[in-house]
Amino acid sequence: MTKKILVQDGGFEKAMRKFKKKVQESGILDELRDRQAYVKPTIKRKLAKALAKRRWKKIIKDQQLPKKLF
């Protein structure tokens, strides 16, 4: 699970960008944020339901006809 990036010719910035990209793709930081605090299953369900409602409202809003301008 270790990530290794070689720095060549003093290109630290390029190596740092590559490292950040690999960490982002692996999802290590996302998992760390999730594990920082315990969230009860009921709270998880409530959050998921609220997000679903928000997505649904956005879909409905996008499908509505524009308001009359006269």
Image (cartoon, helix red, strand yellow):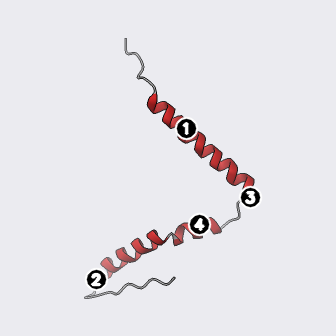
Q: Which sits earlier in the primary sequence, circle 1 or circle 3?
A: 3
Q: Secondary structure at mark 2?
A: loop
Crowd class of label 2 (few under 14; some 14 to 19; many from 20; radius 10 Å): few
Read off the residue under disc 3.
Answer: 40
Q: Are marks 1 and 3 in contact (CB under 8 Å)?
A: no
Q: Which sits earlier in the primary sequence, circle 4 or circle 2?
A: 2
Read off the residue under disc 2.
Answer: 11
Q: Is residue 43 above or below residue 4?
A: above
Read off the residue under disc 1.
Answer: 56
State the residue at coordinates (74%, 52%).
42
Q: How many angstroms separate mark 1 from mark 3 (CA)?
A: 25 Å
Q: How many angstroms separate mark 3 from mark 2 (CA)?
A: 45 Å
Q: Secondary structure at mark 3?
A: loop
Q: Which sits earlier in the primary sequence, circle 1 or circle 4?
A: 4
> Where is residue 62 shown, x and y percent of the image?
44, 32
Q: Secondary structure at mark 1?
A: helix
